Amino acid sequence: MRLVMWILRLLLFFLLFGFAVKNDHLVRLHFFFGAEWELPLVFVILVIFAAGALLGITATFGSLLRQRREIGRLRKQLARSERERQNPLRVDAQAPETL
């Protein structure tokens, strides 16, 4: 199975490498205020891919933090329930005084 995975990885690498070699033409990017850059097409594609991956990671980071806080809260609640189950006769509040 490991051999098959390595063969697939090498195949993917060579396909992408061939794509990069075939698309080495220069691309002119026009920005605001007359600014422009001339870069290889492969570099532009790589930068756009990296920016998209970074944006995706950033978008999921908020929900990941929210889930971690929820897990921590639930663990504390579970620990509290376990303590109450092990010691059911424990009274947290003081009993009212009798006359």
Image (spheres, grey):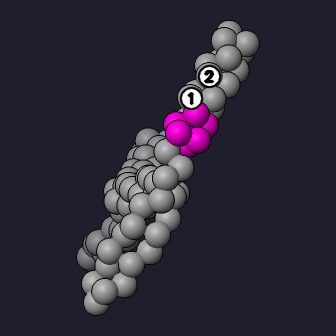
**Gap in angstroms between the C-alphas marked 2 and 1:** 6 Å
> Which x, y percent locates residue 94?
37, 70
Q: Position of residue 35 (x, y in %)?
A: 36, 84
Q: Residue furthest front?
A: 25
- Res 10 quadrant in image: top right
Tell me if 80 is positioned left or right of 13 in this view: left
Nearest the viewer among 36 and 62 is 36
Determine the main secondary structure of the stretch shown in magenta.
Answer: helix
Task: Decide which of 10, 72 is in the foreground and name it.
Answer: 10
Image position, residue 80 (x, y; %): 44, 53
Near mark 1 (Cα within 10 A), the count class, few <14, some 14-19 or many ≥20, is few
Residue at 26%, 76% in the rendered image = 99
Q: Which residue is mark 2?
A: 11
Visible residue check, residue 50:
no
Which residues make up the magenta segment?
17-22
Q: Check whether the beta carbons of the residues at disc 2 and disc 1 lie within 8 A of each other.
A: yes
Q: Which residue occupies the foreground of this view, 70 or 62?
A: 62
Q: Name the quarter where the N terminus is drawn.
A: top right
Q: What is the number of the mark on residue 15?
A: 1
**Residue at x-position 58% and y-position 41%:** 21
Residue in the image at 62% along x and 32% along y: 13
- Amino acid found under the numbered disc labelled 2: Leu
